[in-house]
Amino acid sequence: MAPATRPKPLVCGPRLLADLEALSRFGRRATDHGIDRPAYSPSYRAALDWLRSRMEEAGLTVRMDAAGNLIGRLGRSSGPAVVCGSHIDTVPGGGALDGALGVVAGLEVARQLTDLVPGLTRAYEVVAFADEEGAYLSEIGVRAMVGDVSPDEVRSACGPDGPLADVLSRFGLNAADLSLAARPPSDFAAYLELHIEQGPVLQTLGKRIGIVTEIVGLLTGDLTFFGEANHAGTTPLPMRKDAFRAAAETVSAAFAAVETEFPAETRLTFGNIQLAPGAANVVPATAKLTYEIRAGDEALIDALHSRVLALAGRAAQRCRVEVADRTLARDAAAPMAPEMIATLESVASARGVETVRMPSGAGHDAQVMAGVCPTGMIFVPSIDGVSHNPSERTDVDDILLGASLLCHAVFDVLGCR
Amino acid sequence: MAPATRPKPLVCGPRLLADLEALSRFGRRATDHGIDRPAYSPSYRAALDWLRSRMEEAGLTVRMDAAGNLIGRLGRSSGPAVVCGSHIDTVPGGGALDGALGVVAGLEVARQLTDLVPGLTRAYEVVAFADEEGAYLSEIGVRAMVGDVSPDEVRSACGPDGPLADVLSRFGLNAADLSLAARPPSDFAAYLELHIEQGPVLQTLGKRIGIVTEIVGLLTGDLTFFGEANHAGTTPLPMRKDAFRAAAETVSAAFAAVETEFPAETRLTFGNIQLAPGAANVVPATAKLTYEIRAGDEALIDALHSRVLALAGRAAQRCRVEVADRTLARDAAAPMAPEMIATLESVASARGVETVRMPSGAGHDAQVMAGVCPTGMIFVPSIDGVSHNPSERTDVDDILLGASLLCHAVFDVLGCR
């Protein structure tokens, strides 16, 4: 279909940017302009109050569910909705776009629907999901909405303002009622999320729009090497049981292996290591090495995990130390729906916008929604790949292009042509 | 000369062991029996008071110098003395032998001289040097005695009980008077020190006596790698600037190099590493890696240092990070005097005791004395190489054999045959 035959749901750029700016003030530090807006905090509450009134001004019917998700709805009051969403909580010292962009763009989509499709017969929702960043429990809002939060994890969750149950109570919610937030899959016709890439790939490729193929799976663990503390001067190298040497050899060998044996999009990170006793003149007795593996393909994650363990075992043997492995987290990869990928690509190509397919290396609310309905994600470039940082930025033109494509895609899925 | 023609200066085993036991009670923890006896502390003062009275009972003329060294003298009141010594301060949670053995054995030598050589025409001293372990300033006592402490280092030294100047003042000494402890080289005829090996070499070789050839030189430094903090999920490996990866590759490559290109007695240790930000899902931005190089040959230390820096530079380049090197300490190697080595070997062989020549990987008061007079050291085995630890142990027979050889050597040097 030629672009001329479509209605033209336009994004009102100044309004969308003003919303982003207004939202960024809640929790913003005076010093470095980083934003402190953890879920359920006073700054988060103030941001939600602001968002609620903006939603109401846009003609949405607004409610907060039992998990603290803020939901604005347009069109039919029941039945499956096309949902746009993301989150407005931030990491400590976060930026103005991570999460906020998807919510504000979803709100702008609602306004375009109100303006251009007065008699919407289907339903549209924009949702600000609670605690995507995991100050208490990662993605608790969206997980509660699909009925995937256990009472046990709620009980043990703790964050910057104390135990989650207490924090929820002060926020006006009841931890015991969290399950009331759950909705059946039939409530959701589709889910679309616009997000900044948070990485350097689009900028490096010179592309303005990424279409997410899957949100990668993740395995976090730690390897602890157990050697022997010895005097650095008196213990010959062959008599040592150097836990750090074994850890360092594991890191070197694992990177070499991932680069030569695994696809380029596989991610391996050793984010921390702690030695004991950690003195200049003592051979390290223990080394605790944190690792994280991410890949779009579950089998790849498992294969790289096995490879890392084997290399650690070999290094441990060479250094005459013991090694123990613990898996700390394991999230499955979440493929995006082929029909959503096709829709996003077609609305883009119809407007002459080049796109690139790419995995999302970071987690998003979309990965949970992908389990209950056809889900798609649009990425816009992060300047220098920076995120979770006050200097997180995206070119204004890219922001508006991403929001516009989101809007076109929603119109498409809703059949509003 | 056949053994039968010599006088037989015997060590009184029970007395020497009782002294070690008595001394070990000062600062001993109730929990793990580790000894907390840092220089100038109350437990150190109590130990010195005990030692002073034991010295006086042995007929020594005792004085404490301006640095807190306790000096017991026998024979001529002036002129060069043959000196035995070590230290009675400990590391936190130290053992009963490190330092203490050399002092207690030196005291026993004095008693043997008193008993067997009533008209000693030359001079003998036993010295407990202050702060060998460096709670405030490593080897400050012996360095003050040879006139090698600068006012600057005294001013800036700080330890478990605060600034050194304050601690000295509470101890009854004056930091400004430290230089009064200095004595001319002509005061010293020779220096002999008995010490536990603090390493596993003698035990591994099945030898009971080591004759130290030199105290190795030492270079301590740190390498800081400067990369970039990036999201572990969104940043492809080739786009990262991973400071930890560069550090780990440096460690692996440096150990491989030292093992293939350097003599077996070369010691390379990476005792600590600190990453920032140190989160599981963030590529490390900086890695600060502590290294220590020890070798008996100064040129070897410099060569290995250059090699480590070159490997670090190469790893940094591969990982697209920067690297900076700092030298934190540099102690020159201290060779023992050939005539002292010969004397120690001859008194041993005359008694059918096998010895093995070995470098000392640890620092000792002897390394400073070696700069002013002919110096020798005897090592006895450390069980499992353990030291600086409550479970530091040496077989009683080895303790007594070492003390006996020290005694024979002193008699030899004094010409008391």
Image (tube, coloured by chain):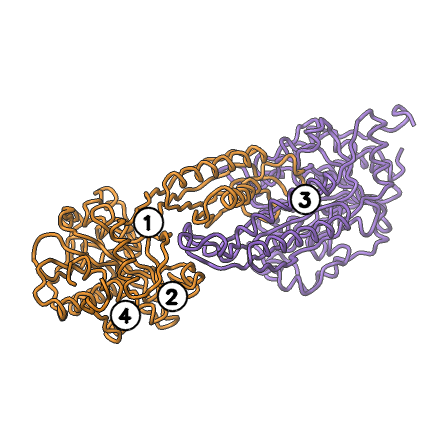
Chain colours: A purple, B orange
Q: Which residue is mark 3?
A: A257
> Which of disc 4 and disc 1 is earlier in sequence?
4
Q: Whole-Å distance between the Cαs marked 2 and 1?
A: 23 Å
Q: Amino acid at mark 4?
A: Leu
Q: Nearer the viewer, mark 4 or mark 3?
A: 4
Q: Whole-Å distance between the Cαs marked 4 and 3?
A: 55 Å
Q: Residues within 10 Å of mark 3 (few under 14, many from 20)?
A: some
Q: Nearer the viewer, mark 1 or mark 4?
A: 1
> Which of disc 2 and disc 4 is earlier in sequence?
4
Res A193 → quadrant:
top right
Q: Which mark is residue A196?
A: none
Q: Both on one chain, marks 3 and 1?
A: no
Where residue A359 appears, as percent x and y from the top left, is: 75, 40
Task: Please give the name of the residue rendered at 56% of the width and 52% of the height, measured from the top-left corner.
Answer: A246
Where residue B337 appears, as percent x and y from the top left, is: 26, 49
Chain where mark 4 sits:
B
Q: Which residue is mark 4?
A: B20
Chain where mark 2 sits:
B
Q: Could you say which is closer to the camera, residue B250 or residue A358?
A: B250
Q: Which mark is residue B214?
A: 1
Q: Residues within 10 Å of mark 2 (few under 14, many from 20)?
A: many
Q: Are marks 4 and 2 in contact (CB under 8 Å)?
A: no
Q: Which residue is mark 2?
A: B392
Q: Is residue A99 left or right of residue B20?
A: right
